[in-house]
Amino acid sequence: METNKKKLTTASGRPYVEDENSMTAGPRGPILLQDYILHEKMAHFNRERIPERVVHAKGSGAYGTFTVTHDISKYTRAKLFNTIGKQTKLFLRFSTVGGEKGSADTERDPRGFAIKFYTEDGNWDLVGNNTPVFFIKDPKKFSDFIHTQKRDPYTNCKSATMVWDFWSLNPESLHQVTILMSDRGTPYGYRHMDGFGSHTFSFINAQNERFWVKFHFKTQQGIKNFTDAEAGEMRGKNPDFAQHDLLTAIDNGDFPKWTLKIQVMPEADAKTYHINPFDLTKVWPHADYPLIDVGVLELNENPDNYFAHVEQAAFAPAHVIDGVGYSPDKMLQGRILSYPDAHRYRLGGNYEQIPVNKCPYLVSNYQRDGQMAVNGNGGSNPNYFPNSFDDIEIDQSYKEPAWNFGSPVGDWYDRNAEGENDHYTQPGNLYRLMDAQQKKDLIANIVNSMSGIEGPKKDMIINRQLCHWFRADINLGMAVAKGLELDLAETMKQMPQGV
């Protein structure tokens, strides 16, 4: 009888019958070594888990489109933006940052906002967060910072003491900590938060002029956050809240959208601007560099298999396209190296051949071999360049203008030297912009978190962090000290002069 159903087969394609019973010596005897189907199933099962990401381990993702609505060709020659109405397919992965793969979606944490644009000039990965700043501004500090967000090596538990000890010793973190301790630290899923490239990037236009640029994705669903109490309750009720919310919205045709806006700074302005425009702990005030509309990002297709698409998606700031480039942002420079290295560790040297990461347009190079080379491995073509046999050539139109680094002296410069050490103005301004309820929530969240500091250095860590809150805003410092039930008169004696 004819049937259109598929046959059950081994990984090598051999149809087989016994998928539920192992071959044994008699009905109650031991299993025979020759039951290779049992071996294949168990051996594959033992290898189903790849190393989880060290950061951004738990995430959700979807496919979608980016549509250009405004002409920005005077800033960039990137083909992605060259025509109003042009659509580009993309994949976007949201994530929490500090938690493991089984952690809750509503933890107080920044959220990853990583986009892979499948453009005709290659894949462009814009790897950002839902905040415009970060805790540190030099990549040498990244592993130390992340260790404080993970588990204590002695207790194997999360530790508020580690967290606040590091933050209090690194006041450059204060701006991001202020955001994190507000209700923006517990967004209501992924659809109701903004996204940012965070770093300063560069645009290059058709005249080879360079501009500095920051990317902002503004949610069209409206900002919505959990309170600290609501986030805690949801951790127990549905730890996968954000995943479920995104998945069901797209399944129901309620496609989430974000408006892409940019800030643009002429290259020369960076030399005289009153803050370092490449400092990841700072924002560019919109009054100086207003938001410029670019287009609309829409998510409209759920992956048909979470592992194949979301877990194997690999984003890296090293993946840029013509017309989009880097800046002297130290954290960005560090990520250019570390992100591809992380993916090679997790997925192998040929991770960009995995469908979710593969450029859908032409890829021509001389990379060969390695584990899981599944793209034909270059066939019989030469594996070296230059050669006299193939038709690959260098297109000089993609050449970028030279960099002028200003100083030819290679050295280790203090990231917080004079002129780079104002860690208080922007977080203080942020606090003063908040309404009364937002201030109340921020203070409650700070007090709740800092109350977890313990051990013999407890008072020292608390007082050190309090100095930072006082420097940002004296009312904020007083409110935190009061919430921690400290003796205000004694606390003020330990505050820096002028607070």
Image (cartoon, rainbow, N blue to C red):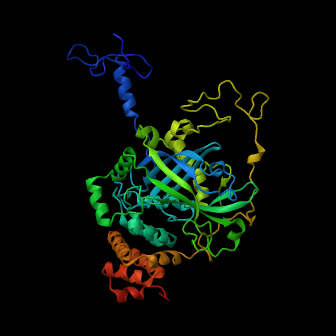
Residue sitting farthest toward the left: 28
Viewer-nearest residue: 64 or 177: 64
Q: Quadrant of residue 42?
A: top left
Residue sitting farthest toward the right: 388
* Percent position of residue 262, x then y: 59, 62
Viewer-nearest residue: 310 or 69: 69
> In this orientation, does residue 166 appear?
yes
Image check: 429 left or right of 289? left
Count of marks, rendered view: 0
Viewer-nearest residue: 156 or 219: 219
* Percent position of residue 314, x then y: 52, 45
Viewer-nearest residue: 108 or 52: 108
Q: Quadrant of residue 203?
A: bottom right
Image check: 387 left or right of 138? right
* Percent position of residue 187, x then y: 39, 61
Specify the quadrant that holds the N terminus.
top left
Q: Is residue 247 above or below residue 455?
A: above
Q: Is residue 366 above or below residue 430?
A: above
* Percent position of residue 370, x then y: 58, 33
Residue ID at (42%, 48%): 60
> In this orientation, does residue 338 appear?
no
